[in-house]
Amino acid sequence: MPKPEKVQLVQELKEKLEKATMTVSVSFSGITVAEINQLRHRLRQAGMEYRVVKNTLLRLAAQQAHKEEIVRVVEGPTAVIFTYGDPVETAKVLEENLRGAPAGLVVRGAIMDGTVLGPEALRELAQLPPRSQLLAELLGQLQGPMASLLAVLEWPFTELVSLLEGLLSQLPSLIAARMRQLEERTS
């Protein structure tokens, strides 16, 4: 029979796994408690949560949350970093905070949207430009073809308007000529 504390801990881990946009597994051997507390504080300020977990409890929580892929990056003494924001921004902050971390803190991998990321992929994610810049670049790429399409679609209407304007400009002279013809017939 499982202890109530462990059942509660599994439930908490399950909820964190479900809410997290990215879950990072790290090894922390050879790190002092003071260093871990300092890292935990920096990560908390960035909206992340550092938590040391038992692998068996994490596996149970992962099964319940339908996030079994986390098991692929968990082995030995494990700490998990739960992140809740934009994955690219989170990866940047995480990379920055782990750069100054003690040598014993090693990233094993991460899970993002059901995909397992190795340490290299996490570093590459951190190198991406911010989301706003990526969206601006995408919009810039779409703007050229859209402007061309608009010009192609607009051209027949422009020609029609030009033709109608030409006819309208000739209308007074045509009416005057027709009036003269009618006057000549009546006289």
Image: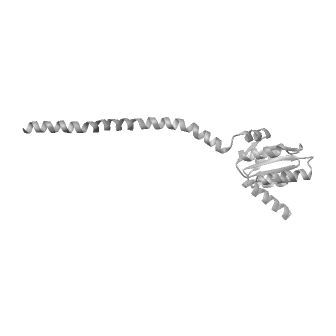
Q: Is residue 148 above or below residue 61?
A: above
Residue 72 makes an appearance in the image? no
1 on left or right of 47: right
* Residue 132: quadrant of the picture: top right
Quadrant containing the N terminus is bottom right
Residue 20 makes an appearance in the image? yes
Q: Residue at x 80, y 50 (%)?
A: 81
**Residue 13: image location, x then y, percent:** 79, 56
Q: Residue at x 47, y 38 (%)?
A: 150
107 on left or right of 87: right
* Nearest to the observer: residue 143 or residue 8: 143
Q: Farthest left residue?
A: 187
**Residue 155: image location, x then y, percent:** 41, 35
Quadrant containing the C terminus is top left
Colour style of the rendered protein structure:
one colour
Q: Is residue 154 above or below residue 54?
A: above
* Nearest to the observer: residue 111 or residue 173: 173
**Residue 175: image location, x then y, percent:** 20, 39
**Residue 50: image location, x then y, percent:** 82, 53
Q: Farthest bottom residue?
A: 4
- Number of numbered callouts drawn: 0
* Residue 3: quadrant of the picture: bottom right
